[in-house]
Image (cartoon, rainbow, N blue to C red):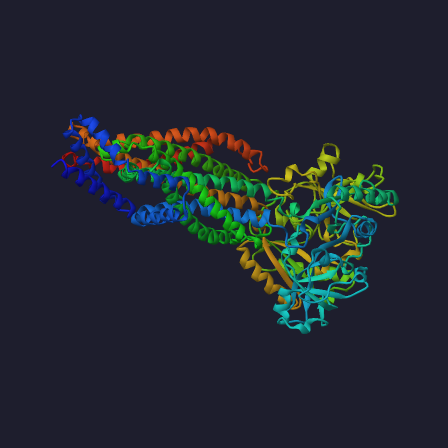
Amino acid sequence: MNNFIPSRIRALISRVRGLFHSRATDSDFAEELDSHLQLLTDENIRRGLSPDEAKRQARLKLGSASQLRQSHHDQRTFPSLESVGQDIRFALRMLRKNPGFTVVAALTLALGIGANTAIFSVVNGVLLNPLPYPDPDRLVTVDASKPNFPSGSISYPNFLDWHRMNQCFSFFAVSRATGYLLTGAGASEELNAAAVTSDFFPLLGIKPVLGRNFAPEEDQIGVSHVVAISTGLWQRKFGGSPAVIGREISLDGKGYTVIGVFPGHLDLPMGYFNSLDVYTPLGEFPNPVIGNRLAGLGIHGIARLKSGVTLDQARAQMQSVTGELARIYPEADNGMGAALTPMKERIVRNVHSLLLLLLGAVGFVLLIACVNVANLLLGRANARSREIAMRSALGASPARLLRQILTESALLALIGGAAGVALASAGTQTALAALPGTLPRAGEVSIDARVLLFSVLISLCAGILFGMFPAMRIARGNSYETLKEGGRGAGGPRHRAQRTLVTVQMALAVVLLTGAGLLIRSLAQLSNVNPGFDPNRVVTFNLALPPQMMHAPPAVIRQTLRNFDSTMAAIPGVEAESLSWGAIPMSNEDDESFWVCGQPRPASESQMYGMIDYIVGPDYLKTMRIPLRAGRFFTTDDNEHSRPVAVVDEVLARKYFPNGNAVGQSICQGDATRTFTSEIVGVAGHVSQWGLDTDASNSLRSQVYFPFMQMPDNLMSVVPSNTGVVVRSSEDVIGSAESIRGASDRLDSEEAVSGFRTMHQIIEGSLAPRRFVVMLLGAFAAVALVLAGIGVYGVISYGVVQRTHEISVRIALGAHPRDVFRLVIGEGLRLALIGVGIGLLVAFVFARLLGSFSQLLYGVGSGDPVTLSAVSLVLIGAALLACYVPARKAMRVDPVTAMRCE
C-alpha cells in the first residue's frame, strides 16, 4: 500500500502538469488540484505529521518540480515570442469565454478612447499639422499697427513702399474682400471675391489648376482687366471646360478676361478666403481712394520670411522701414508700425486655448473609463481567484501572473481602442457639421497616421492603467487561503478597493460636470446680454445693382437706391428697412480717424481719435431698434444737398464731450489739404461691435453714423456692386427673404440679392467657438455621469452578492425589507457624498483655472453656488438611481434559500 500511494501521487502530479501545459479550464484545475492536495495531505498525516504541517508540506511538494519552476523562471526572465503568443491566445480565449464582460468593458473604453481620439484628431489637424503651404514656418501676417488698432489695415501706397523697401521678405502680398455681379453666364449672380497682388499665389506655393497667375505689372491701378476664377465657379458656370481661359466675362458690367483657375478655399487668417468665386488684381479694386495713404480700405498682408531671417529680425527691419516712411510722410505715417505675427498662430489664436482645454477635459473621461473597467476587473477577479491560485500553486511566479493579466488588459484596451477610433471618426465629422465655420482648418481634421498612433498608445497606456491595480492585487494573493476558503477570502479587500475606485470616479465626474456647468451658465448669461439692438426678425443681405448702374452718374445711383428702398418698404410684413455700408454689428473690423472740431488738428493720423463708422439710411435705428439717447436721427432730408450731419454713440459722447453733451458739436475728418466737418445731431445707444463678451474690453468702441445719401460722389460709384441692406419683418424672416427676392426680381431681373443672414445667426457666429466648447464639454460630462452611475451600480450590486449571507441572516432575525433597502441605498449614498465632497474641492481649483483661461467664464464666478449645487444634486441623484435596482434585489433575498445554498 505504501508503495502504491506514492506512485498514484506521482501520476496525479504528471496529470496536473499536463493540464497546466495544455491550458485546462478553471473547473479542470479545481477538480484535479483538490484531489491532488487531499492525497498529499493524507499521505503526510499517515507519516505522523500534524494536519497543519501535512497541508504545508503538501503545498511545498506541489511546487517543488524543478523543471516546472525553471520553465517559469525562464519565461518571466526572458519571455519568448512563443510565450507571448501563448499569453495572447489565452487572453483571447478568456475574453471570448466572458462575452458580457468583454462587451461592457470594450464599450466603456471605446467611449473614453474614442472621445480622446476625436479631440486629438481636431488638435492634430488644427494645431499640430503644419499649414498646407511650402515652408509654413516662414509665413507671417502683416498688419498696420496703430495706437487705436494694433492690427489695422494697410493703405495701398504704404504697402507699395513696404514691399519696395523691405529686405526681410522673399514674397509680400496683400488682399481685401470685395464682390462682383456676374452677368451674361446664366442668371445674374453676386460673387464673393478677393482682390490680391501678384505675389499672393507664389507666396503660398499655389499653382493654377488651369491658366496662369497675375503678372507684377497687373498690380498697377487701372492698367488691366484680368480675373482668375475659383474651381467651384469654373465647374458651376462653365462646366469645367478648359476653354474658359481667355474667355471674357462680365463683372459689374465690365469685361474681364479669365487668365486662370485657382482653389476657392484657402486656410488663411482672413476669413473671406473660406469661400471665394473670383480673384482680381488689387489695382482693379474700384475705389477711388485706393491711392490715398490715409485709407486702409480693409487691406491686410501676408509675407514669407527670407531663409535665415528670424521673426525678430523681420520686426526690427520693418520698424526701420515704417520709421523712414514716418519721416517722409509724417502726417499719414507718424506712429504707424508693422505688426508681424506667425500665420499659424494668427489662424488658430481664437481656438488654441479652447482645444487644449478640451484635450485636458477629455483626459478626465478616459480616466473615469479606466476606473470603471478596473472596477469590472476587480469584480471579475473574485471569480478567477481559484484559477490564479492554482496557477500560482503550480509554480507560476507573481511576475508571470502579472504579465498574463496585463496582456488581457492590453488586449481589451486595443479592442476598445479600435471601436473608439470608429466612434471618433463619425463623432468628429458630426460635431464639425453641427457648427459650420466655427473651427479654422476644419478641412484638415481627419484620422491620419498620427491620430491612429495616438489611439494605439493611449489604448496601451489605458490597458496598463486599469489593469495594473487589479493585477497587483491578484498576483499578491494568498493561493493557499484562496483554495482553502473557496475564493471568498479576498472579497472584503476587493470590495474596499472597488469602493475607493468609485469614489475616484465620482470626484472626476464632479470636476467635468462643474466645468461644463460653468460654461453652460456663462453661455446662458451671454444670451441675456443686451447687444444694443433687437435681433429678433431682422435679416441682412447684400444688394448688387444691375450692370448699367455700375458706371452710372451718382445722382442716378442714388435714385435707384431710393427706388429699392421704396420697393422693400412696400413688401407686406416689412416693418422697417435701411441701406447700410459697413453697418452690420460684429462684422466690421476697420477703423476711421477723427478729431473734435474746434480743437487743434493733430499733427498725424496716429494722434487722432479712432472710431467705427456706420453709413446707413434714415430708418436704420428703427430697423435695428437701437435706442436714441438724445437729439434726432437722420431723415430723408439728410441727403447730398444738405449740410453733413452725424449721429454718435453714447460711448463717444461721454469720452470726448463734457457730460456727454455732443449734440450741436462737430467732428472733423481729412488731411492737411481738405477737412470734412459733420455736425452731431443725435446720440444713439452703443452697439456690441466686438462681441457680447469682449466688446467692453476693446480699446476701440466709439461709433459714428453717417447718412447713406451723403456719401461723396466719388465713393458713390463703389456702392452699386455691394451694398448692405437690413430689414425688420413682422413675420418669419425666412418668408421675408423669399418676398425680398421676388420684389427685387420684379424691380429689375438683373439686380441680385444674396448672402441672407439673420441677426441671430450673426450673434451666434460670434459665440460659435464658445458654443463648440460647451457642446463637447457637455457631451464629455454626460459620458462621465453615465460611467460614474455604472460604477456605483456595479459596486453596490457586487456588494449585495457578497453580503447575501449577511442580508439573509438579518432578514431571518427580523429585519424588515425596508431596512435592507435603506442599508444598500445608504452605502451608495455614502460613496456618492465622499466622491462629491472630494470632487468639489478639486472642481473649485479647476474652476478658478477655467476662469483665467481665455476668459471663458462670463457672469459667473469660479465658486458659483448654483452650478456647484446642481452638479452635486445631479451626481447624488444618479448614484441613488444606480443603487435602486441592487437595493430592490437585496429586499427580495429569501433567507431560507440563501442559507441552504451557503
Furthest-bottom residue in view?
243
Q: Where residue 656 sits in the image (x, y, percent)?
A: 75, 36
Where is 719 relative to 356, above or below?
Answer: below
Furthest-front residue in view?
3
**In the image, is 356 to the left or to the right of 556?**
left
Where is 649 relative to 260, above or below?
Answer: above
Q: How many marks?
A: 0
Residue 130 visible in the current orientation:
yes
Q: Where residue 171 sits in the image (x, y, percent)?
A: 76, 53
**In the image, is 73 to the left or to the right of 313?**
left
**Quadrant where the C terminus is found in the figure:** top left
Residue 611 visible in the current orientation:
no
**In the image, is 330 to the left or to the right of 589?**
right
Q: Where residue 383 sits in the image (x, y, percent)?
A: 27, 40
**In the image, is 136 to the left or to the right of 467?**
right
Where is 27 relative to 717, above or below?
Answer: above
Q: Where residue 55 sits in the image (x, y, percent)?
A: 21, 30
Nearest the eye: 55 or 825: 55
Report the residue at 75% width, 54% height from top: 173
Where residue 61 sits, quadrant-wise, is top left
Furthest-top residue in view?
50
**Quadrant where the N terminus is found in the figure:** top left
Report the residue at 19% width, 36% height from top: 893
